[in-house]
Image (cartoon, rainbow, N blue to C red):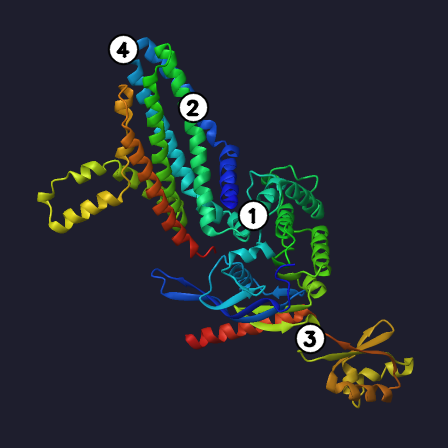
Amino acid sequence: MPGSASGPAIQTENLTKEYPYGFLHLKKKTSLEGLTLQVETGEVFGFLGPNGAGKSTTIKLLMGLIFPTRGHARLLGKPTTDVAMHRDIGYLPEQPYFYDYLTAAEVLDYFAKFFDFTAQERRERVQRMLQKVGLETAGKIQLRKYSKGMLQRVGLAQAILHDPPLVILDEPMSGLDPVGRREVRDIILELKRAGKTILFSTHILPDAEMLCDRVGVLVGGKLQGVGAPGDLVGIKAQEVEILFTLAPTAQAHAPKNDHAPLLAKAARIGERFRLQVKEEELYAALEQLRGASAKILSVSQIKPSLEEYFMHLVAADRAQAAAVEVSGK
Amino acid sequence: MTHIGAVALNTFREAVRDRVLYNLVFFALLMIGAAILVGQISIGIEQIVIVSLGLSAISFIGLLMAVFIGVGLVSKEMDKRTIYALLAKPVRRWEFLVGKFAGLVFTLLVNTAAMSAGLFFALAYVKHGLQSADAGVLVAVYFILLKLAIVVALALLFSCSTTSLLAILYCAGLYLAGSFVQQMRTLRTDLMGNATATFMRWLSYLLPNFENFSVTGPVAHGRAIPGALILQNTLYAVVYCTVILAVAAAVFSRRNLK
């Protein structure tokens, strides 16, 4: 498999993209700032971030569609300016749009012509891909009659048509219904099982948690964190949940007990009580529960979701931006 | 070459599927109407009227196609974002441009060939047959095609670097200026300053000289076109298109496809 040798599949160093704006193009807007990142071969890497965070900019820089202001990137060990390396890369653009006067089979055949396939190989691959993305019955309809979700499937088919070792997908779940999302997830997992390296950007955080070995969170053009989803969310302070029951006689007094202030925070759920405390308060809470003759049902660590982590970073970035704006005034 | 051929074929297919070649119906109706009318009102000048009208129509319709389709060759792909998936394949940007150019020139070739066939039918109708001297019409059609290739190259260059509206204006301006290059060269330079005279001289050589491609008059009157002019115009068109495409490729190779 070309390009799948050891070493990172994607490597960027100080990758920066600035766009000039204003009447004389003297002002600059930074879309991506100093991105240094490495995606290992065989890894599924998720790019997370709100709109305008720089995800698509990064992907376009990697694909050589736009050029960096500073820094550089290498895909499969080759610079992004090397067009020949596109033989080993599959790319799905954000909200893909293809020649609407062609059918899905024709558009796939057209793209297949840029690889060294014979006419027979092209026909077979096109049929296989249409089947894989669930368009085998719609393959002969012009794309102008396709829905957004169907176009997304054509986009996915053209990205993996040539069986590339590295697949880059810009918002692959966008515009898909739950069934379509599930199918795309299955395709990504199938590619992962086949040893492909996958980088995809997404807004849908549960998908990233489910599919990715590692994720990178981009906010305001800056990479705010990289790691396994579980590790990333673990960065935040942990809390502990205690479920317990109380004897009927103790129930009347427990929540108001001045000697057990933590118990006052407990919430009643039917016959049970739920208490959420910080990790460092755990032993004190257990001591107070013992004093109240509580029966402890379970003690479990609460891990924040990736969404909470994501929102925490976005909120921090917005607060920082607001502070800069105020100081600027 | 495979890549260029694939892009060219797709460009031609787009023109066919978007019903661009429907203009042939209009041309056919024009030629039939003109042949019938000329047969009734003119005596002895049927060939002049039919050839002049036919070649002018071929040139005008071809020009409209070259400009209006040409300015959208790249900008339309960028506006519709179809270019992203294509340039993510192992295709170089200059291959894409040359393929687009070849595709539109091929479309114009098919269109012009079909219109020429219509012109010959009309000519045969009014003259009750064709003569060997009528082959000069083919040379005139060939020159129109060379002229259109230059227009396509210019439209492609503007398509890479500006909006469609401005590209249409630039193409129209250059076409008009290029149609009066000889006049520019014979201007009274003694009435200008040295700098202006030098500028006008250089400008007249930089602008595409479309006047050289206009042989409708001699052909309509049945005069032969010299072989040297055919060779000169062919070389001129090849060199001019190559230079313009090279500039377009240089501009497009560093363009950010936002």
| Residue nearest the observer in this picture, A87 or B210 | A87
Q: Residue at x 81, y 87 (%)?
A: A257
| Residue nearest the observer in this picture, A79 or A33 | A79
Q: Residue furthest bottom?
A: A259
Q: CA distance from mark 1 to mark 2?
A: 37 Å
Please name the residue that numbered disc 2 is placed on: B26
Neighbourhood count class around disc 1 (C-alpha, 10 Å): few under 14, some 14–19, many 20 upward: some
Q: Amino acid at mark 2?
A: Phe
Marks 3 & 4, CB-CB < 8 Å contact: no
Q: Amino acid at mark 3?
A: Asp
| Residue nearest the observer in this picture, B164 or B214 | B214
Between label 3 and label 4, give the one nearer the viewer: 4
Please name the residue that numbered disc 4 is placed on: B44
The reply to the same-chain question for discs 4 and 2 is: yes
Neighbourhood count class around disc 2 (C-alpha, 10 Å): few under 14, some 14–19, many 20 upward: few
The reply to the same-chain question for discs 3 and 1 is: yes
| Residue nearest the observer in this picture, A133 or A323 | A133
Between label 1 and label 2, give the one nearer the viewer: 1
Please name the residue that numbered disc 3 is placed on: A231
The reply to the same-chain question for discs 1 and 2 is: no
Q: Is residue A122 visible?
A: yes
Pinpoint the chain carrying mark 1.
Answer: A
Neighbourhood count class around disc 3 (C-alpha, 10 Å): few under 14, some 14–19, many 20 upward: few
Q: Residue at x 86, y 87 (%)?
A: A290
Q: Residue furthest left?
A: B190
Marks 3 & 1, CB-CB < 8 Å contact: no
Q: CA distance from mark 2 to mark 3?
A: 69 Å
Q: Residue at x 78, y 82 (%)?
A: A264
Question: Which of the two discs, 3 and 1, labels the residue nearer the N terminus?
Answer: 1
Circle 1 sits in a helix, a strand or a loop, which is it?
A: loop
Q: CA distance from mark 4 to mark 2?
A: 27 Å
